[in-house]
Amino acid sequence: MATIQHLPSHIYVTRLDYGRLTNLVQQPQPASLAELVTVLQQELKRAHLVDSYVILPHVVTMNSRLKLRKVGSDEELRFTLVYPPAADAAERLSVLSPLGVAVLGCSLGDQFQLRQAEGLSSYWVEAILHQPEAAGDWDS
């Protein structure tokens, strides 16, 4: 099972994203996603909820485009955090993926560790390239 440790330990989620994500985890999902659904439910329980129009522009919300850096290496990841139906190989990463669940609600500069079958990886949020709410899109 993917385990996540955030440094610092708080995350922020908009009320709109929270409602949509809560609906998502209540829908039937493939058995292969059961553990990730559980992890997402845990993350949603501990999230600080804020309105879309007041969320700070340095927080990763749904449909945000961001750049992560793997700690201790030059590896850089760029992707947009999306709902599962919109995920594809064109840098759109599902929130129901280990990395997607881990980055939800993080702030610019936050670090997190992600334990997967391959071992422990540490990442930090290097840049938020686009956040819908910061661009005035409070409904996406």
Image: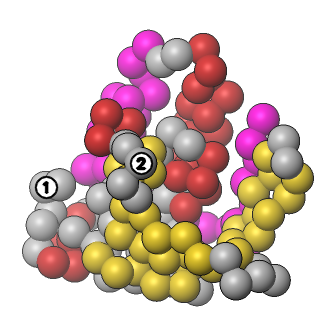
Q: Which residues are magenta?
A: 1-28
Label 2 with label 1: CB-CB less than 8 Å: no
Q: Quadrant of residue 91?
A: bottom left
Q: Is residue 72 left or right of residue 91?
A: right
Q: Amino acid at mark 2?
A: Ala
Q: Is residue 14 visible in this depiction of the protein?
A: no
Residue at 48%, 18% in the rendered image: 29
Q: In the figure, 54 relative to 127: above or below?
A: above
Q: Position of residue 31 (x, y in %)?
A: 60, 14
Q: Is residue 15 left or right of residue 97?
A: left
Q: Amino acid at mark 1?
A: Asp
The residues tagged by marks 2 and 1 sit, at their Cα atoms, a distance apart of 25 Å
Q: Position of residue 105 (x, y in %)?
A: 48, 63
* Picture disc at residue 49: none
Q: In the figure, 25 relative to 21: above or below?
A: above
Q: Quadrant of residue 68?
A: bottom right
Residue at 33%, 66% in the rendered image: 64
Residue lying at the far right in this picture: please name it: 119
Does residue 5 belong to the magenta stretch?
A: yes
* Picture disc at residue 89: 2
Q: Which is in the foreground here, disc 2 or disc 1?
A: 2
Closest to the observer, 39 or 91: 91
According to the picture, the residue beneath numbered tag 1 turns out to be 139
